Image: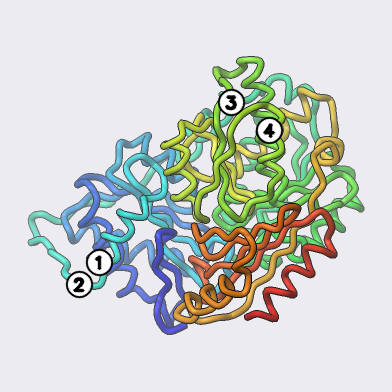
Amino acid sequence: MSSPIITAAGLRGVIGRALNPNVAIQYAAAFAATAPKGLFVITRDSRPSGELFAHAIHAALNALGLPTLDAGITATPTTGILIRQHNAAGGIQISASHNPSEFNGLKLLSHEGRAISKEHADRVLERYQKNEIPWVSHQNIGKCSVCPDTATAHLDAVLQTVNAKAIAQRKFKVLLDANHGAGAVLGAKLLEQLGCCVTILGEEPTGLFAHTPEPTAESLAGVCEIVKQGNFDIAFCQDPDADRLALIDADGRYIGEEYTVALCLEHILQTARKREYGRKLGPMVINCATSRLCEDIGQKYGIPVFRSAVGEANVVEMMLEKDAIFGGEGNGGTIDPAVGYIRDSFSGMSQILDAMTATGKTIANLADALPKYAMAKRKMELEQSRVPAILERAALAFKDLPCDFMDGLRIDYGDAWVLFRGSNTEPIIRIFAEAPTAERAESLCDEMERLL
């Protein structure tokens, strides 16, 4: 990959090939030129390369005459909170999310503390391609300051959405797998505030990941074994910038990412029905690659569930349009407007513990009570330029079935569905299939792979 991937999700690339300080400076300058004037919050996940890019971005924005606030190693959802707390013009999180350590990237956040819209991202890309940077003279250079407290505002916002006192009385034994990412910076404080007995894997944010960063069943097999051998009520597993959350039950069973959003939705709708925490029943938004679990839950509570294109910005835009009370993506990204319009593993952890407390049930009980579906997820290396032709060929092959082109191609079989789409963050095509059985879901993926 010799050029960075630039989409509404931001910029991402391999260090020294697609991504270098010049690229980061050019992209940060393009963002600043399309955002309001003012302070910019700069944060990073724990990858060692992040410090280098942070220095470059601070220097670039200061040389444009803009002040910057350095919040160091911080989770992406915390960055959103800090932007609002400091009334900033925007923020840049230096992170490649779930990608391996050779990658890094830039996530752009608006003055509202959320991912910028697709329209704004398009303006940034246009400006980036022009590479016109209006450097200021020496007397107008901006200053960089250090954020003295990165955690408190986010911690307080999350705690206000749950019954922290009741959770603390349960004294849950929790394993947190931060995998040497940014998650333990706030995760340890939050779980301690909730009265949990916490064991942390990879607490130090070194960026030297103990396993593949994406919190999938395969990546977390070793963590599942640790849970089996220990005495835990639940294990929470984060990706490097802590905007995604996967779950493992007390027996070491990988419950996964898809169930994170569904379990939180079930609990939030229960609290909304009772008018707790100031919530009221309302719509929910998921993306087109998320399990139909959420649609089943929505039907149970009589609320509409809408689907957007994949990508946090797309989900949030539709949440705002539909006045949704909750949203998320099947990759374990929960979005609770009561905390912020951004994927947030800390909000997810708190809602799960609150559900376990309110019901008196284990996480296994709660997960097993939901409808049963099997989902298969695959990916294949593919140049982005080839994706449109492949989608066109697939649409022709399945012209007799209901097809949706909101994001890639989603084919509805009635009792099952399959989606394939080009990734926003990697030179791959992703295949998702959901069906009543694992065999059927795998068979639908096989069919798509044969077509590719």
Which residue is at the front of the view, 441 or 394? 394
Q: Which label was assigned to residue 434?
A: none
- First of labels 4, 1 by sequence position: 1
Residue 342 is at least partly visible in this image:
yes
Q: Is residue 152 visible?
A: no
| Mark 1 → mark 3, Cα distance in angstroms | 40 Å
CA distance separating discs 3 and 2: 44 Å
**Apparent side of residue 381 relative to residue 30 in the rendered image (left or right):** right
Check disc 1 and report the residue beneath it: 126
Q: Which comes sooner in the sequence, label 1 or label 3?
A: 1
Which mark is drawn over residue 130? 2
Q: Residues within 10 Å of mark 4 (few under 14, many from 20)?
A: few
Where in the figure is residue 367, as x and y percent of width and height?
A: 81, 40
- Label 1 environment density (alpha carbons within 10 Å; few <14, some 14–19, many ≥20): few
Residue 124 picture quarter: bottom left
Amino acid type at image mark 1: Glu
State the residue lying farthest toward the front.
Answer: 400
Tell me whether the residue at label 4 lies in contact with that at label 2, contact meaning CB atoms closer than 8 angstroms: no
Q: Residue at x 79, y 70 (%)?
A: 443
In the depicted structure, whether residue 217 falls above or below residue 319:
below
Type of amino acid under label 4: Gln
Separation of marks 4 and 2 at Cα, in angstroms: 48 Å
Circle number at residue 299: 4
Depth-wise, is mark 4 or mark 1 nearer the camera?
4
Mark 2: give few (<14), some (14-19) or many (20+) Cα within 10 Å: few
Q: CA distance from mark 4 to mark 1?
A: 42 Å
**Badge 3 is on which residue?**
161
Marks 3/4 in contact by CB < 8 Å: the verdict is: no
Kindly identify the residue that appears in the image at 74 percent across and 63 percent down. 376
